[in-house]
Amino acid sequence: MFSLCEKTEKKEATISIIGLGYVGLPLALAFSKAGFQVTGFDTDEEKVRQLNSGNDANGQSDSQEIKNALAKTLQITSYPNKISTNFVIICVPTPVDEKNKPYLKPIESASEIVGKNLKKGSIVILESTVYPGITEEVMKPILESGSGLKCGTEFSIAYSPERINPGDTQHKLENVPKIVGGYDHKTTETVSKLYESIIKAGVYKVSSIRTAEAVKVVENTQRFVNISLINELAVIFDRMGINTLEVIEAAKTKWNFHHYYPNAGVGGHCISVDPYYLIHKSEEFGYKPKIISSSMEINEFMPKHVANAVLKHLDKTKSIQKKILLLGLTYKENVSDIRNTSAEKIAKEFAKTGIKVYGYDSFLTGETIKKMGIIPVASLDEMNNIDCFLFLVAHDRLKNIPIKDFKRMSSKNALMFDIKGILNKDLVKSFGLEYKSL
């Protein structure tokens, strides 16, 4: 009888992916393409139905790729009794609650389902971004309780942080190194062998599960703090009348300057959330992070700063009914994900003043936009007398809209507020429109 490591080398090991979102679906497709028998599991029956028809609602995976996998080695289901496989990989969200505390229900629920269907000799891998300790302190006991098996002797666990960047066509799953930390040396080696079958960039093994957990939270927290720093500088420079984007471009000429760009606030399910997880765990150990906590305050302030800058401009216009058009409502470019998006927070600031706020984003449905408290715009052709165009996200589709089209739908002295620096300042001004960036 072959060991699990040997079965993995021979592509005879079976794999289940729990959670088929931005992380889980690409992973399931990659393992299926590599020749493994893969079960993709999700509790959302409508999502399962859509995926079995070849439709990824997130728009990140190709329909034909999904259909090809389904015709070969992939099955997608909402039946938990189908996940009793050699490897079980959990890829569920890790959000925060209304008090910005870690909300672990998705991991707990997934662990309960896996535990009840766990077979002896399996390895359960957590990919969700967490604080150090969750895999062993939260997932492990639930698995043991549900299965009646003992971790370390009858099954094992590992942590391998997801590093997928939705909408990024350059840094894909297969060309970003995979971090692996197992419950013991044997588990680390076996899980590494599994990921090596799909990750061309290779696997980086660390000494423990907690170290692997810390890697991801450090990656995201570092990026978050750096973006918050540049956002604070943008607030300062705005008051001084200095263009932050011009400053950054000039500073980039020095070899050791790490460039980040200002935005209306970091959003999404990962970078804007993970620092809260680290703060929570740090406080359990008696230390309240200072730089990270300050960065969170700056991030929360940015939507209000942007809204105030727009309102200051609108005070100069003569329009009786002020109209604002938000362009790009998702949390980042070229995705349909609106989790923790700044657009919704900015719209709430404008709502306090009674200003009409319209929103256009071809990645979203009108119903989704309406739920954000924004008046949906199906076509820009229907717009007129707009006092401010607020470009929040650099969708490729937005970059291709001619400036003359915005001129047509603008009021006198309309402002083009270019948060992400996607417009040509001189071209905008040549059409008689005002230009502003962070």
Image (cartoon, rainbow, N blue to C red):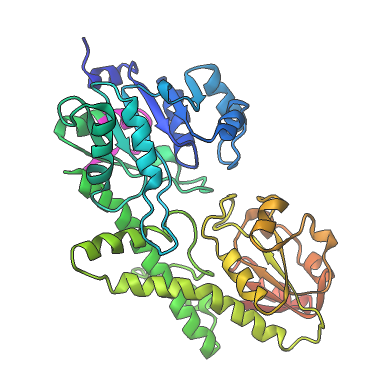
Residue 318 vertical position relative to residue 355 in the rendered view, above or below: below
Quadrant hosting residue 86: top left
Query: What percent of the width, then of the height, locates residue 283?
Result: 24, 65
- Badge count: 0
Task: Return the residue nearer the eye: 62 or 14.
Answer: 14
Residue 88 vertical position relative to residue 209 in the rendered view, above or below: above
Q: Quadrant of the C terminus?
A: bottom right
Q: Please say whether residue 9 is one of the residues in the magenta stretch.
A: no
Query: What percent of the width, then of the height, locates residue 69?
Result: 52, 23
Q: Quadrant of the N terminus?
A: top left
Residue 134 appearing in the image: yes
Quadrant hosting residue 360: bottom right
Instruction: State the residue at coordinates (41%, 37%).
Output: 174
Instruction: State the residue at coordinates (37%, 70%).
Output: 257
Query: What percent of the width, then of the height, locates residue 297?
Result: 41, 74
Residue 100 vertical position relative to residue 179 in the rendered view, above or below: below
Q: Which residues are magenta?
A: 191-205
Task: Return the residue nearer the eye: 259 or 322.
Answer: 322
Query: What percent of the width, then of the height, locates residue 315?
Result: 71, 88
Residue 34 appearing in the image: no
Q: Please say whether residue 192 is one of the residues in the magenta stretch.
A: yes
- Left or right: where 260 falls relative to 87: right
Residue 6 vertical position relative to residue 317 in the rendered view, above or below: above
Instruction: State the residue at coordinates (79%, 75%).
Output: 431
